[in-house]
Amino acid sequence: MVSRRIRKALLLRSLTRHYPTRRGTGVLAPAIDAIARGRLPDSALSSERAVAPRGRWNPDLALDLDHAFQRQIFYFTPAFGHGYLSGGGPAVLARFLAPGGTFVDIGASLGFYTFLAARRVGANGRVHAFEPEPVAYDSLRASAALPGHECVRCHPLALSDAPAAAMTFHLSTVGNSHSLVSEAPGHSGRYRAAIQVEVETIDRLRRSRRLAADRVDLVKIDVEGNEAAVVAGMTETLETWRKPPLYIETRGPEGSTRSPDTFRRLLEILEPRGYRSYLVDRRGASRPVSVGKVRTWADVLFATEPPSSGSSAPR
């Protein structure tokens, strides 16, 4: 039986499903809660989940209504999906993933890329999703239990260039920009708290078979400033996997206070291994990008061969 809270949340979502952009949702979500005649509480004690159904720009997600950011995404799922996926990401998925393929999502968060990739690889494929933040991981795992997501395997781990049984993981004050990387002096307000998480490397996981993947078609990495360390911890595996393409969130010298110029550091690791860097637009068109061209922020495709065009429309 659907609870009263979920019925109420579904009604409110029906009023916001065509909201066009993420901008403003942080202000509107509390107002929508007020319309519900009593604010839905932020509490980890008694979690209720509601499924945001699949749309053009989003997979179906099982979201925690007791968590303010997930509730915001539930109300405005298409707007968030379009915000996360309006660039070249869907074109990259379309270019490299086919039925039976394998995708690795490092920094999966709630799973927008994870479950769109699951659509593409299908029941005979495999998706490995890594997310260390406990609340997001619980929702990721709940979404993986939904029909059509049977190919997804969830891993509650942070990844870097060296293992650690426990390492400080900083929780963001807004959204899901959590990170292993500490902030620069004077910017500590970005984080609200810290927890301890297990950290591994891809190389160790593959050797121990905790990551059972002999072939990978695409890796996506978005770990809020720790991307170069993740790649440094998988150089052996890149060779074993025959150098799969990597789709990575990067920053230039002006793109971050906590971890600037990650694009340059990634090039230093990957170019000697035959990788080149490309920007991909929403239509699937690609062009090379070099140091100096990324000043702030960009999602960059690193590949050993120039990517051909692909469809940008999620399936």
Image (cartoon, grey):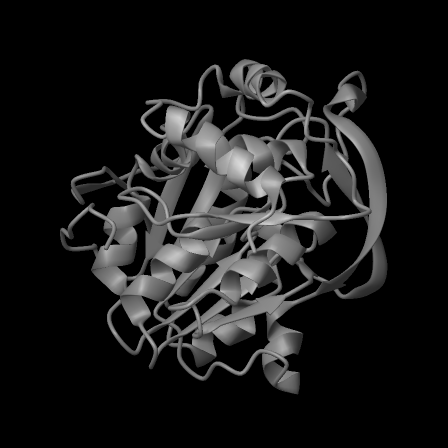
Q: Residue at x 55, y 19 (%)?
A: 32
State the image coordinates of residue 43 (x, y, percent, origin top left).
78, 38
Q: How many marks?
A: 0
Above or below: residue 159 compared with residue 244:
above
In the rendered image, which quarter contains the N terminus?
bottom right
Above or below: residue 92 compared with residue 57:
below
Is there any visible trace of residue 220 in the rendered image? yes
Q: Residue at x 59, y 26 (%)?
A: 256
State the image coordinates of residue 35 (x, y, percent, origin top left).
57, 17
Front-lying residue, 138 or 278 = 138
| 96 relative to 134 in the view: left or right | left
In the rendered image, which quarter contains the C terminus?
bottom left
State the image coordinates of residue 31 (x, y, percent, origin top left).
58, 14
Above or below: residue 306 compared with residue 38:
below
Q: Quadrant of residue 22?
A: top left
Q: Quadrant of residue 101?
A: bottom left
Is there any visible trace of residue 305 in the rendered image? no
State the image coordinates of residue 185 (x, y, percent, origin top left).
81, 21
| 262 relative to 173 in the view: left or right | left
Q: Residue at x 36, y 30 (%)?
A: 17
| 204 relative to 197 in the view: left or right | left
Q: Residue at x 36, y 77 (%)?
A: 125
